[in-house]
Image (spheres, rainbow, N blue to C red):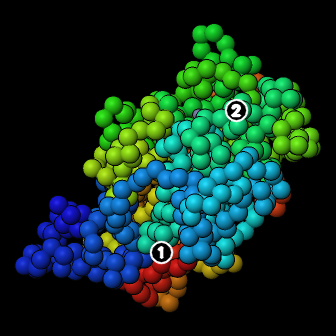
Amino acid sequence: RSAVVERAEELPTESVPANRRLGRRARLGRWRASQKITYSQTPDLYGSPPAPAVGVRTTREREGRGRGRVHRLHSTLMPSSRTFRYSTYGDAVRLLQSLAASAPHLTDLSTTQSLFGLSTAGTCVSADGSRGPCLNYVLQITNKATYTSSRPEVLISGALHGDERVGVVTALELCRWLVERYHHDEWVKRLVDTRNVLIMPMTNAIGVAQKTRAENGIDPNRDFPFDQSPSLCMQTIAARSVNELYRSHLLQLVVTFHGGMQAIGYEWGAYPYYYSGSAHRSPDDNMMRQISSVLSSFAGSGNVPGNRPYPNAPMNDLVYPVHGGMEDWGYAASWDRGKVRTCNPRTYGGYPQAKTSYGDGDARAFTVLVETSDSKAPYEGSLGAESGVYMPGSAGDGHVPRNMRLALAAIDLVQPYVSAWQVATANPAPNVVCVSWSVWGAIVVEEAAILRRDSPSSPWTVADLADGHGQAVTKLAQGVWGASSSPMRPVVKTDCVTLGLHAKGSAELAVRARVDPSWGHAPASKFAPGTGPQSHLAKSRAAGYSSKVGTHTLSSRLEWMSQPLLANASSFKHFRRHN
Ligand SMILES: [Zn+2]
């Protein structure tokens, strides 16, 4: 069955008996018109090819308030059935170049050689067969026209180990997904409009080209200055490339793909925090544990035989401790300074020591290790297809859709986003407005309130519920990443408020949310060192934190507001979205 039919069957047909004679699609159109919901999709997309997957079906948490079914249709175009394949270094470069050329308003393609003057690790073969220097490409994806220095930043690393190949395809296809679907996929558009996404599909470029783990014999994931000897760090171009990106961006969340087992690992993973029995947790464990669990459940198993949802735990519990691992370094080099000694490598003509002396904001990213698959290069037929990305468990699902979902979740989780829209009631009453909302980028909504103000110069105040039960405040709800919610089926809350406007009056409404309160606290016990949370990401949702790296800035916020909605007393039947 197509999703269009499925949606039609969910319609409250009993309230529109005259429509029973109509076909399902016509009935859907009638119903939609009768509900006066503001849809952002254009008519030509509506009802055409089957199945928006994201956001077409919604869950009502609270039955008592709000009337009429709440459906939020996103303008999501059905992906093609194109299957995913491994690509060579040359093919990957060609894809990145064509994506960048096709969307100059959304992308900047560069290399760490051109950006930071790094050396090249050797010679690679281009798509046309010519040989040239191996370049470490970075595709930056964001809406450049609206860019501000406070836009949150995420880095996706495809492969620090060149023979672990699922992450390379995942990162490349993620580039394509974000660029090509920008105009057809409401979720993708919002992510690209509100995040600065850096994607490095071939972090260890020469390793990817040669299908070898190391870069010229040196393991890049022991090459970072965290519990590592000065002569044994920053020896590889791969590690230097990562180092330069951390130093020039305010990275909050980093996904680093590997392969050879299935797991999501988080800090700590270094010897100083390894103890027999079970490992000590990091001060950011509340946030890390919750996000890793969300990434695991949204990724699913990829519908690949033998796969299971990713176990997720601190790396010291999951695998084994290492010296010089990227993850602990990326999380803690800016504040756990006793573990960091500046590097003095001899390779590629050396590397300035100042490059491993860190400012306060450089290395505080939640750096998530993802071990994608038991095989480092699974059978190509198990990689999946575009059609599987938003349809977990379907025939098109596979290793790559699974990890694209994981990366999309990480990009979403870097910042809360309150989505609010007005819905009509089945029995409209004067001065009553019903507002639905959901909170993206968040797991727990600690408190949400519907606010109103009568003019842009007046202060926001909490609106009163139309049923007389007090103020429109909800305590403890699920964010879109809550346990029984996901972008495919986001939890939506609805409340109706009374406005008390005069005949010609108007008011603005907005939803304000406070989210993920536990992130601002260290875990209850057994964590080290004895300090509060240190990551940008955890601190960005608590009071009184700010940071700066290069031109990039971060100011924490306790409360997140939706775009305002405009309600006119004179035209309650014609609410429109105002943003
Ligand atoms: Zn690896």
Mark 2 belongs to which amino acid?
A: Gly
340 vs 238, nearest the viewer? 238
**Vertical order, 452 against 173 (above or below):** below
- Residue at position x 15%, y 73% in the image: 24
Tell me: 277 left or right of 180: right
Q: According to the image, label 2 marks what residue?
A: 217
Residue 450 pos. (x, y %): 52, 63
Distance, label 2 to label 1, CA atoms, is: 43 Å
- Residue at position x 66%, y 26% in the image: 269
Q: According to the image, label 1 marks what residue?
A: 183
63 vs 210, nearest the viewer? 210
Tell me: 308 left or right of 271: left
Q: Quadrant of the C terminus?
A: bottom right
Mark 1 belongs to which amino acid?
A: His
459 vs 371, nearest the viewer? 371
Whether residue 40 is visible here, answered yes or no, is yes
Residue 292 pos. (x, y %): 53, 37
Tell me: 343 left or right of 375: right
